[in-house]
Image: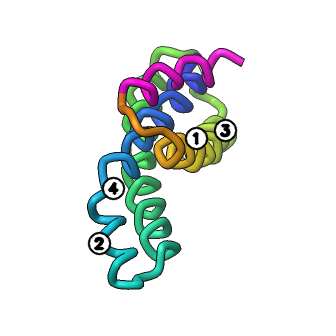
Amino acid sequence: MALIVALFLGLTISAEEIFRDRKILKRERFLNLSRSSYLVSKIVILVYHIGHSVISFCSCGKPYDGYNHMGLFYWLPYFPQPHLQICLGLNISASFNSAVTIYILIPLIMIP
């Protein structure tokens, strides 16, 4: 269950980022700036935010889940999955033109 919450955090944090910055992207395209540098900066900032979110979520829930003896092996699955969800959320954000569509699509992606 905690892994699903971590995946949901990754999607919801990144789902509206590119959609919200359309004006900035238009200005950068006009100035012939690199689109890859924009995406890398978004990914770096979102990885930082999701790292803090996952650490705080796992540290708050760890005393209650009964896996106190697992150490580093306990934390391992919680980091790569939300980072992949950040990339998926950025792709969704770039693909659709409405915030409502983006947030309706998130549960449909999480179900499978």
- Residue type, numbered disc 2: Arg
Q: Nearer the viewer, mark 1 or mark 2?
A: 2
Disc on the earlier residue, 2 or 4: 4
Q: Is residue 25 left or right of residue 36?
A: left
Spatial CA distance of label 3 from label 4 is 33 Å
Q: Residues within 10 Å of mark 1 (few under 14, many from 20)?
A: many
Quadrant in the rendering for residue 67:
top right
Residue 6 in the image: state x and y as whole percent. 52, 31
What residue would you read off at disc 4? 22
Q: Cβ–Cβ below 8 Å for labels 2 and 4?
A: no
Spatial CA distance of label 1 from label 4 is 21 Å
Toward the viewer: 42 or 9?
42
Label 1, secondary structure: give it.
Answer: helix
Toward the viewer: 27 or 1?
27
Disc on the earlier residue, 2 or 3: 2
Spatial CA distance of label 2 from label 4 is 9 Å
Toward the viewer: 99 or 40?
99
Query: In percent of the image, x 29 and y 72: which residue is there?
Result: 27
Q: Give the residues drawn in magenta, as a range.
A: 100-112
Disc on the earlier residue, 1 or 4: 4
Q: Main secondary structure of the magenta part?
A: helix
Q: Nearer the viewer, mark 3 or mark 4?
A: 4
Label 2, secondary structure: give it.
Answer: helix
What residue would you read off at disc 2? 27
What residue would you read off at disc 1? 85
Q: Is residue 99 above or below residue 95?
A: above
